[in-house]
């Protein structure tokens, strides 16, 4: 992720180059997003990694608090996003906080048990 302070050091570089935005996309976006600082904010957001989400298998019938506890025991910083949970009939959605993604999701007990 590119921080604003890092960008200030490279002001001689066009923002579309700094943020790795293709020329064709930059040309289209600068026509719709004004002023330029909002365009740069948008580019910064495009370069921000997305949150990781896990859907809880509703057929396993394990209470959400047990799933959260087990994932936390396995080193993941997880939380429930009230905006997207629950998502019937597909189960509940658990988010992994940024920085915690390096923990091994596939190595967790819940993942291995198909929850």
Image (spheres, rainbow, N blue to C red):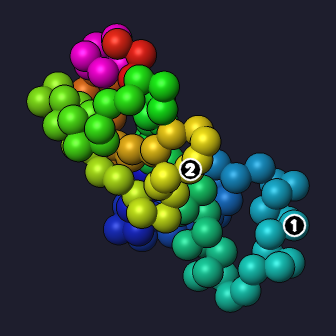
Q: Residue at x 61, y 63 (%)?
A: 43
**Labelled disc at residue 36:** none
Q: Residue at x 78, y 62 (%)?
A: 26
Q: Residue at x 59, y 82 (%)?
A: 37
Where's residue 88, x and y in %?
58, 47
As measured in the structure, the alpha-carbon distance from the residue carrying label 2 to the one carrying label 1 is 35 Å
37 in relation to 104, above or below: below
- Residue 13 in view: no
Of helix, strand and loop, which one carries label 1?
helix
Q: Quadrant of the C terminus?
A: top left
Out of 29 and 73, give the one closest to the viewer: 73
Out of 101 and 95, give the one closest to the viewer: 95
Q: Mark 2 near mark 1, Cβ–Cβ under 8 Å?
A: no
Where's residue 17, x and y in %?
65, 53
| Sooner in the amino-acid sequence: mark 2 or mark 1 | 1
Q: Which residues are magenta?
A: 106-112
Left or right: residue 10 versus residue 27 is: left
- Mark 2 or mark 1: which is in front? 2
Q: Residue furthest left?
A: 73
Out of 93 and 49, give the one closest to the viewer: 93
Where's residue 98, x and y in %?
33, 47
Q: Residue furthest bottom?
A: 35
- Residue 64 in view: yes
* Mark 1 neighbour class, 10 Å CA radius: few under 14, some 14 to 19, many 20 or more: few
Give the residue number, with chain letter if any, for mark 1.
Answer: 28
* Mark 2 neighbour class, 10 Å CA radius: few under 14, some 14 to 19, many 20 or more: few
Give the residue number, with chain letter if any, for mark 2.
Answer: 87
Does residue 91 belong to the magenta stretch? Answer: no
Where's residue 74, x and y in %?
17, 25
Q: Residue at x 19, y 29 (%)?
A: 70
Of helix, strand and loop, which one carries label 2?
loop
């Amino acid at each position: 992720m590119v921080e604003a302070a890092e960008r200030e050091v490279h002001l001689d570089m066009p923002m579309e180059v700094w943020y790795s935005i293709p020329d064709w996309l930059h040309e289209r976006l600068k026509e719709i997003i004004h002023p330029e600082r909002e365009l740069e904010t948008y580019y910064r957001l495009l370069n921000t990694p997305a949150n990781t989400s896990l859907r809880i298998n509703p057929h396993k019938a394990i209470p959400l608090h047990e799933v959260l506890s087990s994932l936390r025991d396995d080193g993941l910083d997880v939380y429930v996003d009230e905006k997207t949970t629950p998502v019937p009939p597909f189960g509940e959605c658990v988010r992994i906080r940024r920085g915690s993604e390096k923990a091994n999701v596939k190595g967790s007990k819940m993942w291995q048990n198909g929850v």
